[in-house]
Image (cartoon, rainbow, N blue to C red):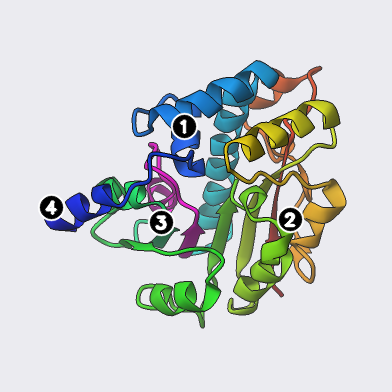
Amino acid sequence: MTGTDTEAAQHRIDTSRPHPARMYDWFLGGKDNYPVDEELGRRLLDIQPEIKEFARQNRRFMRRAVRHLAGDCGVRQFLDIGSGIPTAPNLHQVAQAEAAEARVMYVDNDPIVLAHAGALLSGTPEGETRYIEGDVREPETVLERAAETIDFTRPVALSLIALMHFVPDTDHAHALVARYVGALAPGSRLILSQATGDFDPEGVAKGVATYAARGAVFVPRSHAEVVRFFDGLEPEEPGVVPLDRWRPESGEGAESAGQDPVPIYGGVARKV
């Protein structure tokens, strides 16, 4: 990526409205966000003070799932849609630590991610790491461009981490996921995490209203609605669960023992 590409991306960044990638960066303690993102983030913290921990738990889930797929399952290709602003370790670093030859394609629709894409492209010499600007709601375009790096005749791990709760049902969220899964070869996996209001309906409803008041969309979904994203796939144990309970590693399970579950479901499933 050239300096001209970076400058062009920065000129297209809309700082008048919050964006999920920048807010996620703020929740994780990053610096690549704007006052509009921080302002909404602080309002959400007033409603749900644990939200920064939820963001960290989401990153831990991603790392566990990718290590499992690259290490235990032998998956060598990853398509990460809604990649967000680089936060170490990035998905490609996790995958390529297990298999140096892994290929990773990142996709996001926020120009600020493009402006920082250099951090997403520092993969191993044996593997391949690329970034394209694209929108999950345009599957044909995303799949066509991803095919420049990803071989869709071989297994691929499709990563939709903390993305689909920003896609409303009016954009046919479940049909979109089914379209992407339909393009994958047998042996591929879907990794997905999605916020829910199952554990704190009142608090989450306030959060949804806070997003809406600032022109943003946030769509929590029930367990049944999240499970539906995995229709036709073979779930990996322990299924679709609060993501802090998806194969916690040493120390992580004790952290949440006796506490309410993280209100984000996570799961991994295999295409047979």
Q: CA distance from mark 4 to mark 1?
A: 25 Å
Q: Which mark is residue 37?
A: 1
Q: Are marks 3 and 2 in contact (CB under 8 Å)?
A: no
Which residue is disc 3 drawn over?
99
Q: Which dot, 4 or 1, sits closer to the camera?
A: 1
Tell me where residue 149 sits by quadrant.
bottom left
Q: CA distance from mark 1 to mark 2?
A: 35 Å
Find out whether residue 83 is within the magenta segment: yes
Query: At which x and y percent is residue 102?
Result: 39, 61
In what quadrant of the picture does the C terminus appear?
A: bottom right
Q: Which residue extends farthest left?
A: 3
Which residue is disc 2 drawn over?
236
State which tag comes first along the sequence, 4 or 1: 4
**What segment is highlighted magenta in the picture?**
77-98
Query: At which x and y percent is residue 227?
Result: 80, 56
Identified by mark 3, the residue type is Ala
Find out whether residue 255 is within the magenta segment: no
Q: Which mark is residue 3?
A: 4
Residue 37 to residue 143: above or below: above
